[in-house]
Image (spheres, grey):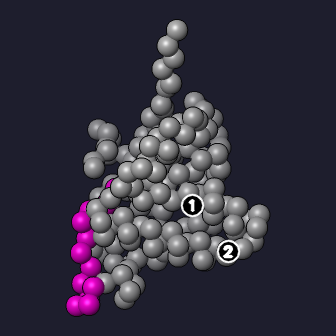
Amino acid sequence: EVILNEDNKVPLIIDHERQYSRFNEYRNVVQLQMKKYVVKVYVQKSMTKEEAREEMRQKVVTAMKYGTLLQIDMADTAADLMKDFCGPDTFPTDLILTPGALNEEKHYSVLLREEDKDEYGHFLHKGFQAIVSTDFEGEEFAEFLADALPIDKLAPLEIIEKYSA
């Protein structure tokens, strides 16, 4: 599945009705539900940032292994993917949100652990693409997500609900 625009930016799906996220729940899409991590790390304190980043790493590796889309679902949160949930060998936000970067072994190999490889020590990489989604409406996303995401790497696409009269 290739979803790129002419600027080679990662799509940022603006969907305050969550139609896109609900649709992806039934597709072969690996979803990173960032609201869950915010709640577990900061509210419930049932998970450390390190544990969250490791779980996120595992999902990225799964998406790479099976060649599926990785949806980073921000929902109605501004989970800080630039600092708190970013790690050079667990969740390198800059690489993940640079189209094609994790298709190069020198970049994706930092995410791999021995348990991610087959019995011969190989990792079959079938491609990778990330997409970001948010529930924030219209231009709100820039205000709320400016410090959480590299906005300059994203191409906002708003889902407009069609109403019938």
Where residue 100 sits: x, y (%)? 29, 58
Q: Is residue 87 visible?
A: no
Q: Is residue 106 above or below residue 128?
A: below
Magenta residue check for 66? no
Instruction: Identify the residue at horizontal 70%, vertical 61% (top origin).
Output: 39
Q: Give the structural element (helix, strand or loop) at label 1.
A: loop
- Which of discs 2 and 1 lies nearer the camera? The answer is 2
Where residue 70 sits: x, y (%)? 41, 57
Total marks drawn? Answer: 2
Q: Amino acid at mark 2?
A: Met
Residues shaded magenta: 118-129
Instruction: Identify the residue at horizontal 48%, vertical 32% (top origin).
Output: 158
- Say the numbered circle drawn on residue 18: none
Where residue 134 sits: x, y (%)? 55, 43
- Say the numbered circle drawn on residue 47: 2
Q: Give the structural element (helix, strand or loop) at label 2.
A: loop
Q: Is residue 20 above or below residue 124?
A: above
Instruction: Identify the residue at horizontal 48%, vertical 62% (top origin).
Output: 93
Q: Amino acid at mark 1?
A: Met
